[in-house]
Structures are given as C-alpha cells and as structure tokens.
Image (cartoon, helix red, strand yellow):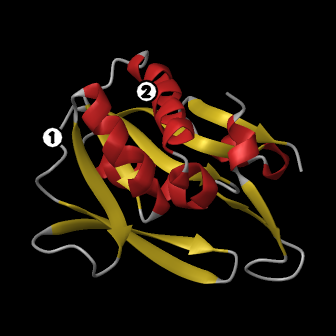
Amino acid sequence: MDLKSHIRGVPDYPKPGILFYDISPLLAHADAWAVAMGRMARLIQETGVDFIVGIESRGFLMAAPLALKLGLGFAMVRKKGKLPGDVVRHSYDLEYGSDTVEIQADLVKPGQRVVVVDDLLATGGTMTAAIKLLRDVGADVRAAAFLIELDFLEGRKKLDVPVLSLLNYDK
C-alpha cells in the first residue's frame, strides 16, 4: 500500500512558506492506518525495546497503538504543566525562546530499553529534548521512530540514536 497517498500536503500552514504534512487522511483510512502501524511495529521490534514513549501530541497517536501492538507499556512526554504528580523536566532552547518537556517520574525505570515515537521528524529539537529527559531518568534510549521524516531539514543529524522512519520526504 502506498501510504504517502494518504498524507495530505497543506501549503502555507501554519504560516506562509511551510508545507504541512497532514496525517489526518491516514488516520481516517482504517486499512492505511493498520498498515502504517504494522510497518512501524516491525521497525521498532528489531531494537529489543521493552517500553514505548510518545511525544505530545501527535506522537501519542503513533506511540499508544504501537505499544499495544507490541505488548509494551507506554508513557507520555508532555509540555510543562500537563502531567499530574511528580515529574522530571528538561528545558531546551528553540529558535526563538525556550520550551520544557516533562515525564512522570515513576514510569520509566532505570535501564529500561525505550524507543521514543513522534509523528514527524523535522529539525529534531523536540526529540533531542525528549531523549535527554529520558536519559535523565535512566532510560536506555534505543531509537527514535517517526511516521514521517523531512530529510531536507536534516533533523536526524541532531540525534545520537538510530532513526527509524517509515516515510521520507526530500522537500
């Protein structure tokens, strides 16, 4: 199945000059969605992982069904102030300003083999921060997995873990 035929390019969103890769049509097509999750699960399974972490918010749409399909636990990396209880946080710089990501302190165990999942790899800033956060809690981050990778932005160069991408775009 050609999964790219289920990804919609939306020009000038969220601002002029940006081509947004909309995964909504893929999510709306049950067969395409199942094929995408099956293919991603096979990529992830080869890492020897025992836990899946998803990045807010579209990463949750990938990570939760992958964890279920692989019979693994799942945790969320969210923006500051969105998770209850004790959290561990990591602040990082953006092109203009900064941001903070958090994870609940007791969910990922030291030494646990983790794959971090998001819908799309662009510049790699958020994934880099999530990996740092997970290492702060003792995780063994095995890979970063994405439905889509925008090769031309070279985000994988910022990551020091293997990058698993299902669909690649060069513009």
Look at 50% across and 22% down and name the residue there. 43
Is 84 left or right of 129, judged from the image as shown?
Answer: left
Specify the quadrant of the image occupied by residue 135.
Answer: top left
Look at 79% across and 43% down and name the residue there. 151
97 lies above or below 146: below
Residue 59 seen anywhere in this rendered image of the structure: yes
Look at 52% across and 36% down and name the residue there. 31
Between residue 82 and residue 154, name the one nearer to us.
82
- The residue under label 2 is 41
Q: Position of residue 54 (x, y in %)?
A: 38, 51
Between residue 152 and residue 134, name the one nearer to us.
152
Look at 49% across and 77% down and name the residue there. 99
Label 2, secondary structure: give it.
Answer: helix
Q: Position of residue 126 (x, y in %)?
A: 53, 60
Q: Position of residue 167 (x, y in %)?
A: 69, 37
Between residue 61 and residue 126, name the one nearer to us.
61
Specify the quadrant of the image occupied by residue 8.
Answer: bottom right
- The residue under label 1 is 109
CA distance separating discs 2 and 1: 22 Å
